[in-house]
Structures are given as structure tokens and as C-alpha cells.
Amino acid sequence: MTSDPCIGLRVARCFNPASLQSLGFAWLTSDSLYDALARTVRYFRAISDAVELELSLAGDECRLSIGKILYRRRSQDQSHDALWASVISLCRVSTGEGFAPVSLELARPQPPCVADFYALFRAPIRFGADRDVMVFRREDVERPLPTANRALALHNERIVADYMTRLDEDNFADRVRIRLIESLPSGGIEAEDVARALNMSVRTLQRRLADEGTSYTALLDRARHELAVRFIGEQRMPVKEATFVLGFSEPANFSRAFKRWTGVSPTEFRQAD
């Protein structure tokens, strides 16, 4: 796990709507930001099952908040930072770089890199709050989006809904792998964290994976492989940053693993892309 207190903000720089696949395209084609935010809340479990989001309108404000934390992780502050940074990124993709919330309340303590938070969100921020809440102007989120296309939004929403149905029915190994892919960019996750989130012991976790012909170590390696290819190839993340995001102690260790996965070094992979 990296010691960078602002790693969540930096990881979100590599984020774009395509990162969310069909949910991202549903966002882009929603009628308004409120419509897009409502879809995100409705299908957030397709992105993460660590927290539940809540969306509400009151007077001239719209509030997006973390309503319930379903499991806690060592990198919770950075994970929530990445969530809010990604929300702002999506809002700006849809409405323009000038978009900013009214305010942001964060349960995390104030980090030493607080200037980075103000530079990104461009709004008053209160640290040490009871829970995380981002406040928008109601008129901003209800304004029609120029990219709105209801038919495409509904089409992509159906794809996400089908995915969530399959997620519930998928085998146990896939559930663990998806959790790893979701958690690694926020600082990594241990077998104990996965077992706790699934309400079982580590021994039960290992036994169930063994029953399906795999192991936690194998799934972790596969998740790192998938994310490494995405970070290095699609998102152009620096090798040093990818090293720590994916839980490697040194860039040399990451480079060796990357070559084992792909047959080439990260630099060669990027040049050939």
C-alpha cells in the first residue's frame, strides 16, 4: 500500500467514462447530470460493493453521499478520494471543465496535500465530517446534457442490469476477482479483507477457491495483470505509479511481472500500442 495520502486523486486522473464501460456510456447519454448520478447510485454495486451511495434533492441543492460503508479497508480514505475525484471527472466530461460542486464534506482527516484537493474540486471542503457528502446546485444537475440520447442510455443501462444479474449468479472465484480489480487501484487488498467482506474465514475463502480450481494468489496475479495492461496501455500511467498502485514494492518487481504476463516490458508494450 502506498504512503501517498493523495494517491486517490492521482489514480482518478486516469479515469474516464470508458473505464465504466456500459455504465459510463449510460452516464454520457443521460438526460441530465441528475439522471446520470441516479444511474450511478442505482448500479454502483457494479463498480464497488464496499459502500452504498445516496442521492437526494432538497431545495436548490442536490446531495450525493456515502450512505453506508459495507466493509472497511486499510486504504479507505484514498478509496473515497478516488470516488469523489472520479465523480467530478465525469461531471466535467459531460458539462465542461468549469463545473464545480457547491461544497464537499469528507470524513477523512485533512491530508498534508490539502492544496491538491482544493485545486481539483474548486469548492469549500470540510475534513473530519460525519460522512462524505458532495453538494451540487440543483439547477446545474437538472440542466439537459448536450450528449443526451435516451435510447442509448436505456440500452446501456440494460447491459449493466444484465451484468449485475450475472454477477449475483457468477461463480465464487469471479466474485473474488472482481473485488480485487475494484480494490487494487485504491491501495490493494489482502485475503483477510476479502474474507471479512464475504462474511467468512480465510480458510473458508481458500477452500471455496480451491473447489473451483484456483487460489487467492492466482486471482490476485490475474487482477494485477488485467489492471497493469489497462494502466500502462490505455491510461498511460507512469510505471512508478502503477508499481505502487498494484502493490509491488519496487518498479523492477513490477516490470518483471509485466514481462511474465505480456512477454514484453512496460515500455515496449506502450510503444507497440
Image: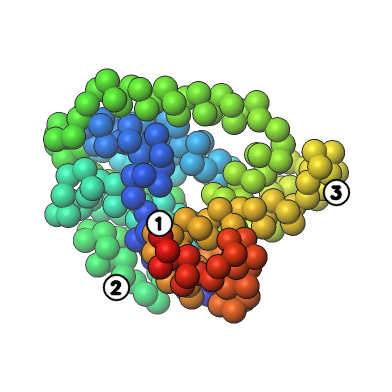
Q: Quadrant of residue 207?
A: top right
Which quarter of the image is occupied by the N terminus?
A: bottom right
In depth, the one of 5 and 23 nearer the eye is 23
Residue 168 percent coordinates (x, y): 62, 28
Q: CA distance from mark 3 to mark 2?
A: 44 Å
- Residue 119 numbered tag: none
Q: How is the image coloured?
A: rainbow
Q: CA distance from mark 1 to mark 3?
A: 37 Å
Name which residue type carries label 1.
Glu
Name which residue type carries label 3.
Arg
Residue at the disc numbered 1:
234
Residue at the disc numbered 3:
203
Q: Earlier in the sequence, mark 2 or mark 1?
A: 2
Q: Earlier in the sequence, mark 1 or mark 3?
A: 3
Q: Which residue: 27% across, 37% down? A: 28
Residue 218 visible at all: yes
Residue 181 percent coordinates (x, y): 57, 50
Q: Which residue: 70% across, 33% down? A: 171
User: Dot 3, crowdedness within 10 Å: few (<14), some or many (≥20)?
Assistant: few
Which quarter of the image is occupied by the C terminus?
A: bottom left
| SS type, badge 3 | helix
In depth, the one of 5 and 163 nearer the eye is 163
| SS type, badge 1 | helix
Residue at the disc numbered 2:
115
Vertical comparison of 258 with 206: above or below: below
Name which residue type carries label 2.
Ala
| SS type, badge 2 | helix
